[in-house]
Image: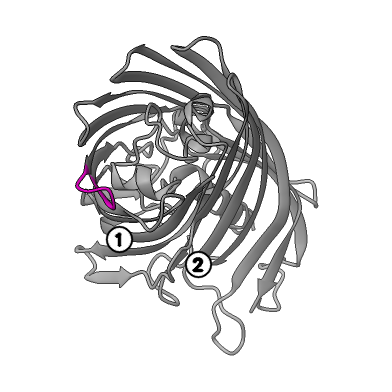
Amino acid sequence: MRKFLFLMVFVLAGTITYAGGYRVSVQGQRALAMGHTGVAVVNSAELGFFNPAGLVYLEDRLTVSAGVSGVFSDVAWQNEEYGETARTENPAGTPFYFYASYKVNDWLSAGLSVYTPYGSTVEWPEDWAGSHLVNSIKLQAIYVQPLASIKISEKLSIGGGPIFVTGSVNFNRNLDRTLTDIDGNRANVTIDASGVNEWGWSAGAMYTPWEDLRIGVNYRSEIIMNAEGGDADFENIPNTPMAPFSDTAFDAQLPLPAELTIGASYQLNEQWLFAFDFNRNYWGVYEALDIQFANGVLSENPRNYEDANIWRFGAEYKATERFVLRAGYYYDESPVLNNYFAPETPRNDSQGFTAGLSLNVTSNLALDASFAYIRFNEVDATYNPDKDLFPAYEGTPFGGTYKSSAFIAGLGVTYKL
């Protein structure tokens, strides 16, 4: 019975981990085309996400950027020892963004940002070898942020504002490897939590030591997501005292880690712009999940993530008055350590290759497109936490070789007046 109870606890741990272990970096078509650089690039209202301090340098009274992307991802798993394989069947994710900036006067701009830094779906085949850990998971988190950008001098500005986050999650997994009802249907649980709302903030600064060089820094705070009163629905449970499961509620907390970005852009000439961003993601705060069930059971589930870095490089080429071409590259470290690698977050080190363009339809309207191919390093990893660090952990190790890739195609508009 103790093992069954632990398995129920682990369901929730796996669910909320997905938000912490997988970050969707699609917050602007122009930025993504340039390797998702932007902390020191002043070319659109996408600055509302990358560095609101730069909004005050936009030339037009009103600037709006909006767009949506399709994320097509694939994960293949193999355990050569037992000859088992599986591949996800993920529907396309659709992260979106909307940014607006209004120049109040020469030294003050106001803005609004709405974006989705977390949100995707993973679906493994029914009753695959890891179904006791995850069958499917769907996560969405929407950030809404009012902004202010203030010019301290012609060379220095600051900006930022509060962040309101609202999110939801739906997750399904089998209770263990063998438990079934009288008809042979695998016992499983679906947990669902919606309307999870929290607050955070971000702040940035931009410095222009000379006309062609900009330096930017932006910090986004840690946000603690509190899921309270979520629903856990158990199905195909056999009628036996050894499986005492019934629908219940749960509370849980998840720290969305702080992020620090430092970067620079250099305008080489009228045609060429180069950019570099360094991101520090403070995943080290994510040591474990505390799960509180309505029946009074409290469980801590190990994650033991580490801080991780991303190096981003981008270039922009103004081919004509109508066409602007972009390309970029980034290297993204995974925060997930071996022995803590779970199939609901098959996240290993990755490289991103990006490209895109803008078509200036009129002097006020441009169409922006971006494309990205993300190649994750093949990894042979397990989920089997260190008993010395987490002596209360009980669970069956699960591992294998993971191969992952993703393709992103996005379309947006930029309007200025």
Q: Is residue 105 left or right of residue 297?
A: left
Query: Magenta stretch containing residue 323, yes or no?
Result: yes
Whether residue 356 appears in this view of the structure is yes
Q: Position of residue 170 (x, y in %)?
A: 61, 63
Q: Residue at x 66, y 78 (%)?
A: 238
In this rendering, position of residue 336 left or right of residue 240: left
Mark closer to the observer (1, 2):
1
The residue sitting at 37% across, 39% down in the picture is 336
Name the quadrant containing residue 165. Answer: top right
The mark found on residue 407 in the picture is: 1
| Residue 205: percent from left, percent from top | 49, 18
Q: Earlier in the sequence, mark 1 or mark 2?
A: 2
Question: Residue at position x 27%, y 58% from top?
Answer: 405
The front one of 236 and 402 is: 402
Query: Disc 1 versus disc 2: distance between alpha carbons?
Result: 20 Å
Mark number displayed over residue 382? none
User: Looking at the figure, which quarter contains the N terminus?
Assistant: bottom right
Magenta-tinted stretch = 318-326
Residue highlighted by disc 2: 136
> What amino acid does circle 1 point to?
Phe
**Horizontal and vertical percent position of residue 69:** 42, 60
